[in-house]
Image (cartoon, rainbow, N blue to C red):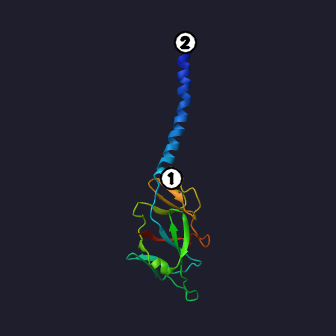
Amino acid sequence: MQDMARKKNASLIIALSVPVVMVILVALAIYIPGMFYAPTYDFVYSTSDWNVYRLAVVREGKIVLEEPPYVDEKIPPSDPIIFRYDIETNTASEISLEEAEQLTLDGAQFSPDGYEITRGGNGGIFDIFGPNDSYNTWYIRGRSAGKRLNISNNNDYYYNFRFVGWILP
């Protein structure tokens, strides 16, 4: 009789522990990649108040302004506002074109340590269902982890944020 009670208790313990173990495994799958999240490269981006603005691009490791692909003679193109983003403090600060010209930049999509700037969603395990955040929210993501960026943007139009390049040492 005692053996029968033990078998019932063992079955009950196993049945209750399976969901608990699953919750723990899912939590580990979500949080472990974030523990190794450590991007090291700051970057430069630009914004503008207008649709038509000069584009800040990287040529031979330096920032240059290019004329927009189309120009309306009635509305001359404006210069972009340039920002330096500090990854360590998760903050952006406006810099002048002259300050930006002193930086050595890499205009590649991915930083030398494998991270990229993406729009909406944080690139985590649940992004298989599509982005889970606003189209105007930006993230740095890589190595199965992501972090929301505190992007300074002049207004909410999606075309105003423009990644320029990663700052090289």
| Residue sticking out furthest to the right | 155
Image location (x, y in percent) of residue 5: 56, 16
| Residue sticking out furthest to the left | 60
10 Å crowding of disc 2: few (<14), some (14-19), many (20+): few
- Residue that appears at 47% across and 66% down: 42
Task: Kindly identify which residue carries mark 1.
Answer: 124
- Residue that appears at 54% across and 71% down: 161
10 Å crowding of disc 1: few (<14), some (14-19), many (20+): many
Q: Quadrant of the C terminus?
A: bottom left
On the picture, is 110 further left or further right than 81?
left
Is disc 2 placed on a helix, strand or loop?
A: helix
Q: CA distance from mark 2 to mark 1?
A: 49 Å
| Residue sticking out furthest to the bottom | 73
Name the amino acid type tagged 1.
Gly
- Residue that appears at 53% across and 50% down: 126
Residue 57 marker:
none
Mark 2 vs 1, N-terminal side: 2
Residue 59 location, quadrant: bottom left
Image location (x, y in percent) of residue 53: 53, 80
Decide which of 7, 63 is in the foreground and name it. Answer: 63
Image location (x, y in percent) of residue 35: 48, 50
Q: Is residue 72 above or below residue 47?
A: below
Decide which of 104, 53 is in the foreground and name it. Answer: 104
Q: Is residue 167 above or below residue 72?
A: above
Q: Are marks 2 and 1 in contact (CB under 8 Å)?
A: no
Task: Kindly identify which residue carries mark 2.
Answer: 2
Name the amino acid type tagged 2.
Gln
Q: Quadrant of the N terminus?
A: top right
Q: Is residue 134 above or below residue 155?
A: above
